[in-house]
Image (tube, rainbow, N blue to C red):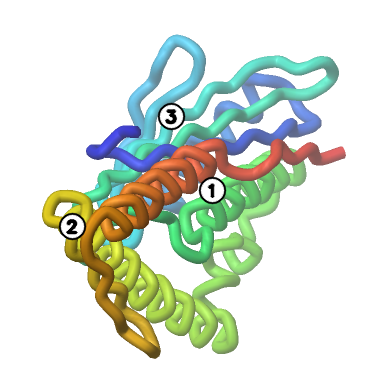
Amino acid sequence: MDWKYKHFYQERVFPASRDLVSESARTFMGESLGWRVTDTPDGFTAQGHSFSHRAIANLRIQSAGAGTKVAVELLVARAGGRGFMLFDVGGYYNIQIRKWLDGIQWSLHQKLTGSHDESTNPLVLAENKPAACIFNGCLLFIVATFALYFLVIFISAVVGLLTGHLFLLGSGSSSIHGIWARILSALILVFGAFADLRSDFGCSPERII
């Protein structure tokens, strides 16, 4: 388990040449998203901030049959301006990666058609929809609430494992003492670590035809 960065991964295949997809990806990540782009042997790295956390996106761009595969590995610093992140509650960062892949598709379409219509940019569309703004606000509130709750449970489990006194926060808050407190605390920590490792794999690869 990486305590410094939370890892996310997704990939998608685009029906275009490697050079064109690479140029489109750089355009979107650098210009539309505003992240700092640095070239690597098999793609590039983009650095910026997402939800008040410093983030590094490693993009590997490879030819795949008649198209080009873009693999995105996102590393998000667990410590940020909104606290410490244990879990990606609500799948926020996986949703962001999907938006970036949609943005690369949009940038690719712009280059293929010669269009310069920013109004169709997925980022602009998301910002201009009142319902999307309300939804994002509610999502951020839910994410912050669940993150705080899981942080309290995590701290309680650590204390319970060390001291044998476990406090469970909920509608019917209760305390457990002795060996059962240590066992339950260990199970909570193991489950949390397992869920964190599972979420690092991200979503299933997507393919655009």
The x and y percentages for residue 37 are 35, 33
Report the residue at 32% width, 72% height from top. 149
Query: Residue 119 at what x, y percent from top left?
Result: 61, 68
Q: Are marks 2 and 1 in contact (CB under 8 Å)?
A: no
Horizontal relation, residue 204 to residue 180: left or right: right
- Residue at the (48%, 60%) spot, across then down: 92
Q: Are marks 2 and 3 in contact (CB under 8 Å)?
A: no
The earlier-in-sequence mark between 2 and 1 is 1
Looking at the rendered structure, the kind of residue marked 2 is Gly
Please tell me whether mark 1 sits on a helix, a strand or a loop: helix
- Residue 122, placed above or below residue 104: below
Residue marked by disc 3: 58
For the C terminus, which image quadrant?
Answer: top right
Identify the residue under disc 1: 97
Element under disc 2: loop
Left/right placement of residue 104 relative to residue 148 reads right
- Residue ranking furthest to the front: 178
Residue 84 in view = no
Q: Are marks 3 and 1 in contact (CB under 8 Å)?
A: no
Between 38 and 90, the residue placed more toward the observer is 90
Q: Nearer the viewer, residue 102 or 16?
A: 102
Which quarter of the rendering shows the N terminus?
top left
What residue does disc 2 label? 164
- The residues tagged by marks 2 and 1 sit, at their Cα atoms, a distance apart of 41 Å
State which mark lies toward you, 2 or 3: 2
